[in-house]
Amino acid sequence: MNASRLPDNRQRLSLTWRVLALSSLLLLALVVLFTWLGHANLSRQFEESRREHHEREARELRLALQRSEASLQQLAALAAASPDLGPALATGDEVELVESLSPQWPTLQLEAGVDEILVFDAEGRQLAEWGEPQADRERPLQVWVQQVMETEFPLSALRCADDCRQYAAVPILVAGESVGMVILSRSLADVTRQAHQVSGSDVALLITGANGVETAPERYLENWNGHLIAMTRQDAYLSLLHEAERTTSLEELLASPLQLRHDNRDYELSAVRMETDQSRRRTGYFLLAADLTAQIRAIKQDTRTLMLVGIGGWLAAELLLLVILLRPMARLRRLAEVLPALARGGFAETRRAIPVPQRRLLDEIDVLEGTTLALSDQLETLEREVSARGAQLAERVDELAHERDFVGSLLDTARVFIVTQDAQGRITLVNAYALAVMATQKERLLGRMFDDVFVSRSGSDPSGEVAMEERSLITADGRQHTIAWYHAPLPSRGDERAARISVGLDITERKLAEARLTWLAERDPLTELYNRRHFQEALGNVMQRGRSGAVLLLDLDRFKDVNELSGHHTGDRLLRMVGDTLFQEFGHRGVIARLGGDEFALLLEGADARQAICIAKQITPLLDSTGLDAGGQRHRATASLGIALFPVHGDNPADLMASADLAMYKAKESSSQRWHLLSTLERAKDELQERVYWVERIRQAIEEDGFELLAQPIMRLSDGDVRHYEVLLRMRGPKGDLISPVHFIPVAERSGQIVQLDRWVLRHSLKALSQVQEQGVSLSVNLSGQTLHDAGLKQFLMDELTASGADPNHLILEITETAAVTDFSSARGVLQALRDLGCRTALDDFGVGFSSFHYLGELPVDFIKIDGAFIRTLVTNPESQVIVKAITDIASGFGKQTIAEFVDQPALVPILQSYGIAYGQGYHLGKPAPLRDIF
């Protein structure tokens, strides 16, 4: 914004002359001011000294009166204590009374200045008198007598008439009783002389209101209505007092001293009132006069000296200032002309107007010119930087606002414990979720030690620095929670131990479930016997130690009939009875396990063939006597037992169990006995024949498409919709019957044909999927553990998807939990590769091993299929309910959907829905059927 310029013809007054004029006015004003201040200060000091002097004189006069009064009372007390005075007064003998004080009167009159002594009895009658009384007919003698006799205390008074006297009245005591009193009086002549000696001033004693006082006429002060009864230096002092009475009143003189000029000299006159008794009609005053001529002349002389020195200094300063300012002010005018342009941003204009200083010795204006040039450059640079920084700051403010809102929202809504601690471990912040769980208030937590609120579960030092730990919390209602804490340090300022933020997850339910699942990891949930996994581990450990022994494999005969006739719950009851019987009778002999379905196994470490056969013979009748009635049917637990010895029939668990399985089937085929011990020669021959037979059957079926694909529906429990089927494999027999995979899958796994078999199933499943995917149907295909190690699986699947035209999103590939956990790294890599192709994945038979809970969050699967052993017993077994609920919650927490297998009765559906299980599969919801019949 440009300022309007003044016309060129306007008169200007140079800054130099303005400075001179203003400085002159200022200096003159300062000279006058300092002169006045000096004079005022001297006058003030003089006034203060005179005021102090006057106060000191008044104090000295009062002290003199007080000392005179005290000494007069002492004299009165000595007179009252005369040994003859009291008895004479008590007897009323006036002659003896006069004689008692007459010897003391001359001494008191001459040396103490006592003017009068009066003696009174207790009734107030005056009995004796010495000296000259005061010309005061109104003395309150009777009042004094009455007061002293009543109080028995001395009394003092000051009375003024034709003179001023002090009175002292003292009681006379005889045997502790007041029998009269004595009064002494004395004039103030001594006090007047003492005041003159102490102050050095002329002193006069004035009595006002006194009529009939015999004094010289010139000592009467008419305006003050008083007589001067005593004074010093009358020739000089009397005329001064007459002039003072014409100038001021006595009351004004009492209020403040009076300064007046008399006979070409300066005097100060002051007055001090004497305190007399209340009944007085006359008043006495001390009048003090001091000569101040020398002090006032000194003050005036000092003031003139100050004025002359100030004027001389002003003239010298103005001349010197004029010489100094002429040239520098010209340069300052040039700077004044360019600075407004610099303020408006005229940086180039400023640099052109001011020359760069070239002199070696620079003065302040040279520095100012150089600084102005530098300031021009800096302001120009700063203007550019401010514009850029302003934009950056606005962006940063927006970012910080978003971060603040995010952090605040995170603390308020996070379903985790968030706690900050200071360097000593005291809680400084806690979020709303933690307060809600603990059912407490923030004020009760802030400032408490973190280790006192959340107790460490480990045996380590709770104050140690750990990144992750578990701690216990006991809430107000007595419940114990387990909190998993994750600690991270907060930025510190060099403290020895930095503050930290702690985030805690309430894992109480998960810990309870894991504790139960850990126990069940080796148990069969139905019979509470050991499961297949533990049995195989125990067998492997025994064989690794080089021990010998026997394995008894037991399979219930016609168990399928029990399920079909009386339902699976009846079959489960029978399985529990068999498990209880075996455990009670042979639990002390070795490891007893339920391998799955209706298969049981006994591991007899150190047993030979004879001992194994003996136990088999004991089992057979025990199971024959075990049975139950259901639905009008009697079901007995008859079984076939296969016996295999190690290391005779196998040097590893897989071969040994295959031998026991072969022996068990031999027992089923036998009509003479229900157990069979596999001999060494028979095992080798039969196994070779069996393997060659099934290997050839599998190869032929793969080449000639001798397999049949079935599909079992997987229903969405919320609405009963079916858009998902599991593909099941069967082999066509010589007579057209369908052979269960239990007969050829183990052989295919041992011979390595399982990978080719999986590829056959995938190829034909994709062909079928390409025809039904438009209906929204998805097919689920099982993959074996060996296929997970097939390096060409991904490429094969890509080729088949391209050839068939199937949508990979409608293909679900399942692997068993055992296969995934056995080789976790390979399983995770293969599953991720399949998902990268667009396929979905599922974890089958989940819950058998339990250890996969630790890896569930890291496995890239979309579905979790809960093992049917838990689902079938869900209605009657609380432990199964706990396990299924825990599996569902954990899977849901990882964002995975759950499928329940073996849903074979209507009562299971509402339970599964209440647990949040999305899908169900089983005979109640749909039985397997050929693909061509379903679609």
Image (tube, rainbow, N blue to C red):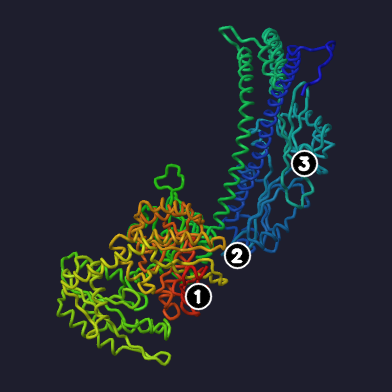
Q: Which residue is mark 3?
A: 207
Q: Which mark is residue 772?
A: none
Tag 1: residue type?
Answer: Leu
- 640 vs 801: above or below: below
Q: Nearer the viewer, mark 1 or mark 3?
A: 1
Q: Which residue is mark 2?
A: 177
Q: CA distance from mark 1 to mark 2?
A: 133 Å
Pointer 2 local density, CA inside 10 Å: few below 14, some 14–19, many at least 20: few
- Whether residue 273 is visible here, answered yes or no, is yes
- 922 vs 313: above or below: below
Q: Position of residue 569 (x, y in %)?
A: 42, 82
Q: Tell me, yes or no, whether the two marked residues, 2 and 3, touch with CB atoms within 8 Å.
A: no
Q: CA distance from mark 1 to mark 3?
A: 138 Å
Q: Nearer the viewer, mark 1 or mark 2?
A: 1
Q: Which residue is mark 1?
A: 925
Q: Position of residue 894 (x, y in %)?
A: 47, 60
Between residues 435 and 585, which one lies in front from this camera angle? 585
Tag 2: residue type?
Answer: Glu
Secondary structure beneath label 1? loop
Between residues 485 and 537, which one lies in front from this camera angle? 537
Q: CA distance from mark 2 to mark 3?
A: 40 Å
Q: Nearer the viewer, mark 2 or mark 3?
A: 3
- Identified at 41% across, 93% down, the residue is 632
